[in-house]
Amino acid sequence: MVLYARDIVEKDFISLSPETSALEAAKRMAREGHGFVIVANPRGDAIGIVTEWDFIAKINSLARDAGMVHLQEIMSRELVSIDAGAGFDEVAQLMASKGIRRLLVMDHGRLVGVVTAR
């Protein structure tokens, strides 16, 4: 049996606006048990991602209260994605070559979920 990105994708993810405060996002991540949030524009297109590490490293370096920092200030803008029909080997190879732990999975230009390396 061949596994595809669509078979291993985590479809339950948090999507927030760029203007959302880091504090609000962190509280929601903790409440819902997620390690990242997708930052989306008003059309719902993914424009960034903020991980637990971003909260630790980037907010600390800004030396500001997390309630005053917006996701657009700390999000990673260079998103890496793959088509939902890509094979598992391709998913693993792309994540390894890019050195990433989270890969966005797209289907006809729409974000359907995220593959996370644990």
Image (cartoon, rainbow, N blue to C red):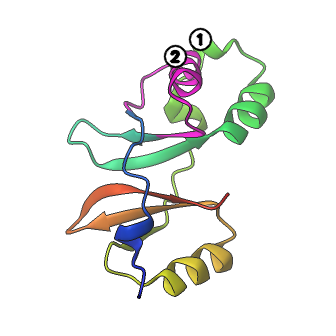
User: Observer-nearest residue: 56 or 11?
Assistant: 11
Please identify the quadrant where the N terminus is shown.
bottom left
Residue at the (42%, 80%) spot, across then down:
3
Residue 33 falls within the magenta-colored stretch: yes
Residue carrying label 1: 67
Is 108 placed left or right of 117 in the picture?
left
Q: Where is residue 118 in the image (x, y as percent from the top left)?
A: 67, 57
Q: Position of residue 81 (x, y in %)?
A: 43, 67
Q: Give the range drawn in magenta.
A: 16-37
Residue at the (37%, 30%) spot, across then down:
17
Q: Which amino acid does label 1 sit on?
A: Gly
Residue at the (42%, 31%) spot, across then down:
18
Name above or below for residue 108 compared with residue 56.
below
Is disc 1 placed on a helix, strand or loop?
helix
Q: Do the residues labelled 2 and 1 touch (CB within 8 Å)?
A: yes
Categorize mark 1 by other alpha carbons within 10 Å: few (<14), some (14-19), many (20+).
few
Q: Position of residue 58 (x, y in %)?
A: 72, 34
Q: What residue type is labelled 2?
A: Glu
Residue 112's quadrant in the figure?
Answer: bottom left
Categorize mark 2 by other alpha carbons within 10 Å: few (<14), some (14-19), many (20+).
some
Residue carrying label 2: 24
Residue at the (51%, 77%) spot, across then down:
91
Is 114 placed left or right of 55 in the picture?
left
Label 2 or label 1, whichever lies nearer to me, is 2
